[in-house]
Amino acid sequence: MDGREIVIAAASDKKHSGKQEKAPGKKHSRRIVFALVIMLPIILLAGCLNLSDEKTFTTADVGLSITLTSRFVEQDLAVWTAYYSSTTSIVTVLKEEFHLFDQHGHDAADLTPEDYARLVIESNREPCDVEKVEGLTTFTYERRVNGKDFKYFAVTFKGPDAFWLVQFGCDRKNFDKFQAQFIEWAKTVKVL
């Protein structure tokens, strides 16, 4: 006997036994549909929120950590303490040690993150103002780089031995779409 004969014989036995198998009832079908209706939005929502997509980058040797997404990669650029990029945005980190301020006539111990932000704005001649956004000391500015217009959300922090400038940047036309995410990422910054 080959496989077809076994299937045919089994079907023939069921017909002759007088017992017929029940098709799944309406109750069983409703339960399946109900479970799918409940589970599908949860699965889709979890996918949209990227709940497990977080990735923490730590530069322990210089003293900072930040949580972004796994779409970011760390790159080594000499002008930045740390540099992270994705296909849609970048994050730059600059550590400026207190002794640099002392050399320029500023007592770093007396400076606040707001003072540091003003110094950065002044030294770069940016037409912007320091703002408090959700407890963060910030400023935004625009810059043309290699023929493209970018907009940056900059946040300043004060550590035990240095100030930190963390900048989130993207194509200017996408800034409004990303700004809320930049704020959330900025809130994850920890000066170690």
Image: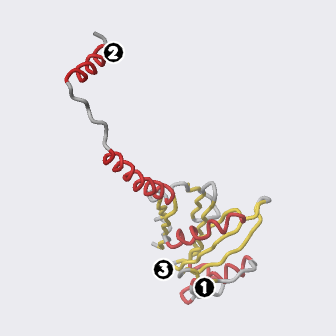
Circle 2 — which element?
helix
Please tell me which residue lies in front, 136 or 75: 136
Q: Note whether 112 is above or below 11 in the view shown.
A: below
Q: Earlier in the sequence, mark 3 or mark 1?
A: 1
Provide residue 54's location: percent of width, then percent of height.
47, 60
In terms of image quadrants, where is residue 155? bottom right
Query: What kind of colouring is applied to the model shown?
Result: secondary structure
In which quadrant of the rendered image does the C terminus lie?
A: bottom left
Q: Earlier in the sequence, mark 3 or mark 2?
A: 2
**Image point (60%, 85%), residue name:** 114
Which residue in the protein does label 1 denote?
Answer: 114
In terms of image quadrants, where is residue 107? bottom right
Count of marks, rendered view: 3
**Image point (35%, 45%), residue name:** 29
Which residue in the protein does label 2 denote?
Answer: 4
Left or right relative to 37: residue 113 = right
Left or right relative to 188: residue 147 = right
Q: Amino acid at mark 1?
A: Glu
Q: Amino acid at mark 3?
A: Pro
Circle 1 — which element?
helix
Left or right relative to 136: residue 6 = left
Mark 1 neighbour class, 10 Å CA radius: few under 14, some 14 to 19, many 20 or more: many
Provide residue 139's location: percent of width, then percent of height.
65, 78
CA separation in Å, label 3 and label 2:
79 Å
Q: Amino acid at mark 2?
A: Arg
In which quadrant of the rendered image does the N terminus lie?
A: top left
In terms of image quadrants, where is residue 17? top left
Q: Residue furthest right?
A: 147
Which residue in the protein does label 3 denote?
Answer: 160
